[in-house]
Amino acid sequence: MKTWVNRRSYSRMRELRPDRGLLLNIVLYIEGALLLLATIWCWIGNILLAPVLVPQGKDFAIGAAVGIALVFTSFVIYAGSYLLEKVFPKRAAGPILSMKRIAVDELAPLFRDITVLDALIISVVSGFCEEVFFRGALQLDFNLYIAAGIFGMFHMPTLRYLTYGIWATVAGLMFGLAMESTHSLWTPITGHVLNNLIVILFLRFGPIDKLTGSSFEKTAENRGEKSGRESDSGNEKN
């Protein structure tokens, strides 16, 4: 019964994944709301974003370097998480999702139907709106660390995503330091957009797409087959 529930729950979870159009609408609504909140916040708090929105060539170059560094860090963490689960397989079933499980079982299915243009739209919209809010409104009103901490919590819907929340906090610190060093919002925006674009394209078109859901689904199927064989054996005896 437990195995059946797990398989049904997993199948149901897969069915509830938003399709391409719904995913784009969700992203646009959430990020649009974040941009609106940033606008209201800056208006009420008299925070001037104009000085940090004047672009210079070096801002985009530094931002691109930050984005690539984050992508490299993500792949290293994913590889380390994958190796740890190979060495300690029991850790894969823990209550806190590893970065590998988040990438394979959570994020990859989310982007399974999108196009390259969709990935670009999602990356640009999320990178711009989130940086205007977290680095523009929050960091300028409070400080680097508060903005990075809230940025991490924004990417951690539940404690199961603690590892992702920690990674997002570190990313927020890097984006914040990039803005402080260049005094330009375009630096973290560029890094954020580039990081999102590369990761989303990898999740959609890279080899990870073939592993989507495998860690859970194969385990559930194997248990289901074993349970079915035991049930058939019991019926034959009866």
Image (cartoon, rainbow, N blue to C red):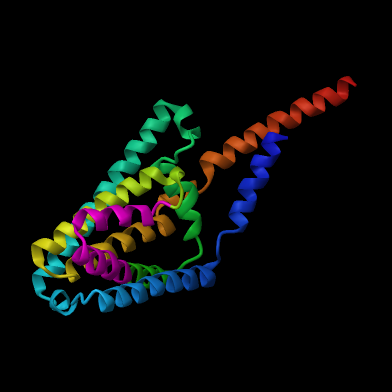
Image quadrant occupied by the C terminus? top right
Residue at 41% across, 40% down:
98
Q: Position of residue 129 (x, y in %)?
A: 32, 71
The rendered magenta stretch, by its main secondary structure, is classed as helix
In the rendered view, would you say 73 is above or below 123?
A: above
The span shown in magenta is 127-156
In the rendered view, would you say 119 is above or below 106?
A: below
Give the quadrant of residue 186.
bottom left
* 77 magenta-colored: no
Residue at 33% across, 53% down:
152
Residue in the foreground of this view, choosing between 55 and 48: 48
**Residue most extreme to the top:** 237
Residue in the foreground of this view, choosing between 177 and 78: 177
From the viewer's perspective, is 10 left or right of 32? right
**Residue most extreme to the right:** 238
From the viewer's perspective, is 235 left or right of 106? right
Q: Position of residue 171 (x, y in %)?
A: 25, 53
Residue at 28% across, 77% down:
44
Residue at 49% across, 73% down:
25
Query: In this figure, what is the number of numbered marks?
Result: 0
Residue in the foreground of this view, choosing between 34 and 70: 34
* 154 magenta-colored: yes
Residue in the foreground of this view, choosing between 69 and 29: 29
In the rendered view, would you say 50 is above or below 212?
A: below
Q: Position of residue 205 (x, y in %)?
A: 42, 58
Image quadrant occupied by the N terminus? top right
From the viewer's perspective, is 143 left or right of 35? left
